Image: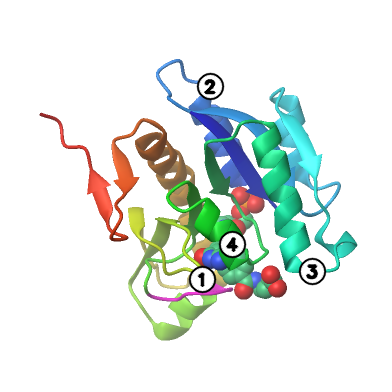
Amino acid sequence: TRVGVLISGTGTNLQALIEHAKRPSSSAEIVVVISNRPGVQGLKRASLAGIQTRVVDHKLYGSRAEFDGTIDRVLEEFGVELVCLAGFMRILTGPFVKKWNGKLLNIHPSLLPSFKGVNAQKQALQAGVRVAGCTVHFVAEEVDAGAIIVQEAVPVLSGDTEESLSDRIREAEHRAFPAAMELVASGAVRLAEDGHIEWKLKS
Ligand SMILES: Nc1nc2ccc(CNc3ccc(C(=O)NCCCC(=O)O)cc3)cc2c(=O)[nH]1
Ligand SMILES: N[C@@H]1O[C@H](COP(=O)(O)O)[C@@H](O)[C@H]1O
């Protein structure tokens, strides 16, 4: 399965996806990395891995529709079949999400549906939860509300700061995202018509 990865920054999740896709047993082949910001470390990671990169700078577009349309054209140019949002920080428009429905994955640093939106780790600390984690979900128009594919829990430890908790969650992300990408790329999991997750159970 030809995979496109959208990033906005560091790209540690991208790095985890790259390393997973390198395995001969993987069904995923990352064919392009698109960033909405120039010069970010994620672009260097892609180039080092021999993956083509494109920058689609949202500041250069008059509307979200035009920005998303350009992203879509790049994905089509590379024959992408599955899109992973890896630290991608722009909200995508309805038409784009509809077109890629069931082919668009996102990683969020909380156990959804708890703590949607930005600074999820901080929300968890402020809520005093003892278990936190990350979620990989299909992207729906409503932000952070799509069908859940994989989750991984991590403990919240006494003395945790937003940084120490984020680091622990990020290690879980680097396992959960490749696992979810593989499940969808291999056809083991798909998004059913009614919006629920469908597993192709081993016969
Ligand atoms: N329609 C749809 N699109 C998304 C785009 C990115 C992400 C990644 N997680 C994100 C979750 C939240 C945000 C956010 O609120 N950023 C501040 C506003 C930035 C902007 O103005 O664009 C960004 C990405 C998830 C979604 C999603 O669940 N649904
Ligand atoms: N989606 C969120 O974006 C952050 C940055 O990820 P990365 O750029 O290091 O992959 C991660 O915390 C992830 O949960």
Amino acid type of the residue tagged 1 in the rendering = Val
Q: Quadrant of residue 112?
A: bottom left
Asked if the stretch drawn in magenta spans residue 80, the answer is no
Tell me the amino acid under the disc marked 2: Lys
Q: Is residue 57 above or below residue 77?
A: below
Q: Is mark 1 within 8 Å of ligand 1?
A: yes
Q: Residues within 10 Å of mark 3 (few under 14, many from 20)?
A: few
Which badge, 2 or 3, comes first in the chain's sequence? 2
Q: Is residue 163 visible?
A: no
Residue at label 1?
143
Q: Disc 1 vs disc 3: Cβ atoms closer than 8 Å? A: no
Which residue, given by chain and number where applicable, does mark 4 sit on? 95
Query: Which of the two residues, 169 or 58, is positioned nearer the viewer here?
Result: 58
Q: Is residue 82 left or right of residue 53?
A: left
* Mark 4 touches mark 1? (CB < 8 Å): no
Q: Main secondary structure of the magenta part?
A: loop
Using residue 188 as the reference point, say whether residue 177 is left or right of it.
Answer: right
The disc, 1 or 3, on the residue closer to the chain's N-terminal end is 3
Q: CA distance from mark 2 to mark 3?
A: 36 Å
Q: Residue at x 69, y 25 (%)?
A: 49
Picture coordinates of residue 68, whole percent (x, y)? 70, 57
Which residue is tagged 2?
Answer: 22
Q: Residue visible at 47% across and 84% down?
A: 126
* Residue type at numbered disc 3: Ser
Circle nearer the viewer, 4 or 1: 4
| Residue 151, above or below 111 | above
Please state which of the two labelled residues, at mark 1 or mark 2, is closer to the viewer: 1
Q: Nearer the viewer, residue 198 or 44?
A: 198
Q: Position of residue 37 (x, y in %)?
A: 81, 54
Amino acid type for the residue under numbered disc 4: Pro
The magenta segment is 114-121
